[in-house]
Image (cartoon, helix red, strand yellow):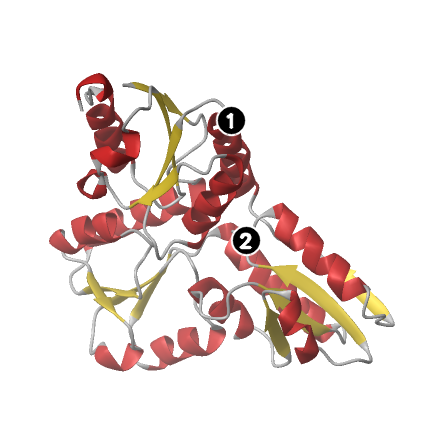
């Protein structure tokens, strides 16, 4: 089968840095804990677990050792709690995520009600929320009732959202007639490049595959975007989830991957897909 791979896909610089920090830490430290999955990819996390990384959800579950702050970051209160327990901290927070945290804190200090456009259950958003006292998280126009009708608001966005979503939400907020509205673009440029590259491939192929963990926000966004341009889009974790029915009668397949999908998963999928003989299915 002919396969076209998106020019921009797989690990972004922030994820690559987090994985590199994790491996370096595991090579020199014992009892290394990750406060939540270091990235949203079960296969890559499992690989690091084999190297000794321990995943925990609560700081209380750590008695001693080193705590690795994952790429999505952690709230200041969590960092302070880790320090009080006398634990060593290694920070693998993406620099762009850290920027969003700093902006949230600055906006509040300037008197703005901080508004985060994003998924309230996503760890990146939860960490940002912890950086200010007066924060409202919205992800659709149905959430606009949460905003105070008066005063001034400062809007930031989860880094992995699509530009179109940010634009439509800011437009909807602006219609509410706030006295002052300050919006700062906190989207990740690498994420946007992956979205644009995926759309280009979508338009050229019979079927599109988006590789990455279902817990990965940027991968889900990629899959949703691809489905708008190619209804024959499938979001798969890895090759094990592939079903030949997806390529029946198809000649050209496209492949992209989320920013948390490692090269070894992508390469394995592409090589196996190329071997599929669609004419003899």
Mark 1 neighbour class, 10 Å CA radius: few under 14, some 14 to 19, many 20 or more: some
Q: Tell me, for residue 159, which label it has, or none.
A: 2
**Residue drawn where x is 25% and y is 66% of the image:** 66
Element type where label 2 sits in the image: loop
Q: Quadrant of the C terminus?
A: top left
* Left or right: 107 in relation to 3: right
Please give left or right for residue 281 compared with residue 140 in the image. left
Which numbered circle lies on residue 203? 1
Residue 113 coordinates in the image, percent (x, y):
71, 75
**Spatial CA span between label 2 and label 1:** 25 Å
Residue 19 image point, x, y percent: 31, 47
2 or 1: mark nearer the eye: 1
The residue nearer to you, when weighing 77 against 204, is 204
Question: As drawn, is 275 to the left or to the right of 171?
Answer: left
Image location of residue 161, percent across then percent down: 55, 52
Nearer the observer, 6 or 260: 6
Is 235 positioned to the left or the right of 64 in the image? right
Of residue 17 and residue 66, the one placed in the foreground of this image is 17
Q: Is residue 238 above or below residue 84?
A: above
**Corner quadrant of residue 5:** top left
Q: Is residue 183 visible?
A: no
- Residue 194 vertical placement versus 138 (above, below): above
Q: What residue appears at the point 38 percent right and 80 percent down from the top-left corner? A: 81
Picture quadrant of residue 206 = top left
**Which circle's residue, 2 or 1, is located before the other in the chain?**
2
Give me the residue at 29% from left, 77% from top.
58
Q: Please tell me whether mark 1 sits on a helix, a strand or a loop.
A: loop
Q: Quadrant of the N terminus?
A: top left
């Amino acid at each position: 089968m002919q396969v076209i791979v998106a020019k921009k896909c797989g690990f972004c610089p922030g994820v690559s840095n987090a994985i590199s920090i994790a491996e370096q830490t595991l090579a020199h430290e014992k009892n290394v804990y990750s406060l939540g999955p270091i990235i949203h990819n079960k296969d890559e996390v499992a690989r690091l677990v084999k190297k000794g990384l321990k995943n925990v959800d609560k700081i209380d579950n750590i008695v001693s050792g080193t705590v690795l702050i994952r790429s999505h970051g952690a709230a200041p209160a969590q960092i302070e709690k880790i320090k009080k327990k006398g634990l060593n901290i290694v920070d693998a927070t993406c620099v762009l995520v850290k920027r969003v945290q700093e902006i949230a804190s600055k906006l509040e200090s300037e008197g703005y009600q901080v508004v985060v456009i994003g998924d309230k259950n996503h760890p990146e958003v939860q960490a940002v929320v912890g950086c200010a006292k007066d924060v409202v998280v919205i992800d659709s126009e149905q959430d606009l009732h949460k905003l105070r009708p008066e005063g001034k608001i400062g809007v930031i966005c989860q880094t992995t959202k699509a530009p179109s979503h940010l634009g439509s939400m800011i437009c909807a907020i602006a219609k509410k007639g706030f006295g002052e509205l300050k919006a700062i673009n906190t989207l990740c440029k690498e994420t946007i490049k992956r979205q644009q590259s995926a759309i280009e491939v979508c338009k050229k192929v019979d079927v599109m595959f988006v590789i990455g963990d279902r817990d990965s926000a940027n991968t889900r966004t990629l899959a949703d975007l691809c489905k708008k341009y190619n209804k024959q889009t499938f979001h798969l974790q890895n090759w094990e989830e592939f079903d030949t029915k997806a390529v029946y009668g198809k000649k050209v397949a496209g492949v992209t991957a989320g920013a948390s999908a490692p090269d070894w998963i992508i390469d394995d999928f592409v090589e196996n897909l190329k071997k599929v003989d669609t004419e003899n299915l």
